[in-house]
């Protein structure tokens, strides 16, 4: 087995007292889909999240990812590591929604994140690159974007209610600790060291 | 090594993914590539064209990749067509189901050109041996 990158279903479920409902918290590299009336929560720095739902059935979900750091020439290369990983991260979420009964023609998306928060962390603005990827992907796949809050310099806390499609975004103008930055840096490092390649099964 | 005339059908419901597979094949020297967005469309194309190889996703609307594979194997005109499954599903039961349905190989996304090359070479090698 190669040490492959693998999108994980979020496992952190809790009861959110503010909204008085169940909540699923997702971390970088995770996703979550549901047909229940709950809230999906995440905190984004330079990462992006697509909140996608079936506007008829209310089945919805969210992912949280960033593109692996590549060379600047990668931007327009459809088979770069970035493009392949980003495509995979989006596909895993959408497939899960379709398996849950969502219909492709009913899908709509709201997209968030891609803040330039890791300044000095890389020469290119990774947040912008992530945001541009998600926009382009959804456009190519004909999934309507009905809302977005991208780029800028602030981290964001995003609450997504898939049943109604409502999203609340809180810009975090002051971070109380380094958790978010550390978490994203660890994730970015993992993307850098792990091979963006699936396992090969022989039979 | 690659026979540039090998005619591929890439089956995936995501246009972004079809484009990736098409470009990976191009990088490996295969330029004769057609696309289909689900199993139904793929079977129609396979039945009307001379395809040499199918690279297919699993999860698709209308007809998924596994059902398509089963129909290919059940069709005397298509039954010996090599089929490589490329999917985001890494679950063992999926891999077993694909093998039982007669898939020639199984690759988990996000794969590289090297992975695809390795897999294709193995399949061609086996086919050559079988063909004597």
Image (cartoon, rainbow, N blue to C red):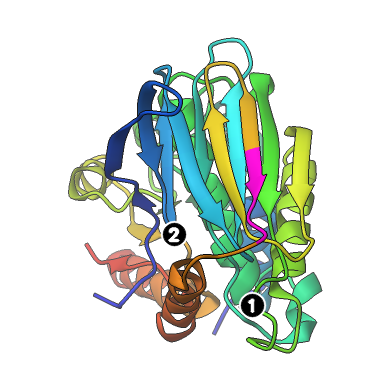
Residue at disc 2, secondary structure: loop
Looking at the image, is mark 2 or mark 1 earlier in the sequence?
2
Q: Is residue B69 visible in this depiction of the protein?
A: no
Q: Position of residue B111 (x, y in %)?
A: 47, 68
User: At x 31% / y 70%, what residue is drawn?
Assistant: B126
User: At x 63% / y 86%, what residue is drawn?
Assistant: A121
User: At x 47% / y 73%, what residue is drawn?
Assistant: A178
Q: Say above or below: A65 vs A14.
A: below
Q: Say above or below: A38 vs A116.
A: above
Residue topped by disc 2: A29
Residue at disc 1, secondary structure: loop
**Is A111 placed left or right of A163 in the picture?**
right
Q: Which residues are magenta?
A: A169-173
Q: Position of residue A101 (x, y in %)?
A: 45, 18
Q: Position of residue B23 (x, y in %)?
A: 69, 67
**Is A46 placed left or right of A141 in the picture?**
left
Residue topped by disc 1: A118
Query: What crowding class fits label 2: few (fewer than 14 Cα within 10 Å), some (14-19), or many (20 or more)?
Result: many
Q: Is residue A28 visible in this depiction of the protein?
A: yes
Residue A171 in magenta stretch = yes
Residue B60 in magenta stretch = no
């Amino acid at each position: 087995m190669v040490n492959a990158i693998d999108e994980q279903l979020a496992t952190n479920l809790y009861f959110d007292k503010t909204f008085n409902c169940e909540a699923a918290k997702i971390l970088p590299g995770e996703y979550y889909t549901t047909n229940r009336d709950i809230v999906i929560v995440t905190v984004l720095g330079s990462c992006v999240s697509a909140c996608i739902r079936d506007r008829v059935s209310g089945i919805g979900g969210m992912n949280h990812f960033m593109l692996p750091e590549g060379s600047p020439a990668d931007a327009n290369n459809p088979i770069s590591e970035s493009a392949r990983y980003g495509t995979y991260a989006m596909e895993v979420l959408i497939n899960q929604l379709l398996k849950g009964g969502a219909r492709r023609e009913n899908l709509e998306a709201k997209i968030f994140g891609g803040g330039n928060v890791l300044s000095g962390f890389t020469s290119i603005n990774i947040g912008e690159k992530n945001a541009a990827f998600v926009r382009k992907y959804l456009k190519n796949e004909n999934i309507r974007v009905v809302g977005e809050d991208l780029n800028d310099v602030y981290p964001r806390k995003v609450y997504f209610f898939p049943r109604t499609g409502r999203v609340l975004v809180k810009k975090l103008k002051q971070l109380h600790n380094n958790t978010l930055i550390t978490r994203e840096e660890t994730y970015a490092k993992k993307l850098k060291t792990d091979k963006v390649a699936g396992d090969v099964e022989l039979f | 090594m690659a026979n540039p005339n090998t005619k591929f059908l890439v089956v995936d419901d995501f246009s972004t993914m079809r484009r990736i597979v098409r470009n990976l094949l191009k990088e490996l020297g295969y330029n004769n590539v057609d696309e289909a967005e689900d199993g139904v469309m793929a079977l129609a194309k396979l039945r009307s064209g001379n395809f040499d190889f199918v690279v297919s996703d699993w999860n698709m609307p209308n007809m998924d990749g596994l059902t398509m594979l089963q129909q290919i194997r059940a069709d005397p005109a298509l039954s010996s067509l090599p089929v490589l499954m490329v999917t985001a599903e890494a679950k063992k039961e999926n891999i077993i189901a694909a093998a039982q349905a007669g898939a020639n190989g199984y690759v988990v996304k996000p794969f590289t050109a090297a992975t695809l090359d390795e897999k294709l070479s193995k399949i061609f090698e086996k086919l050559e041996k079988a063909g004597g």
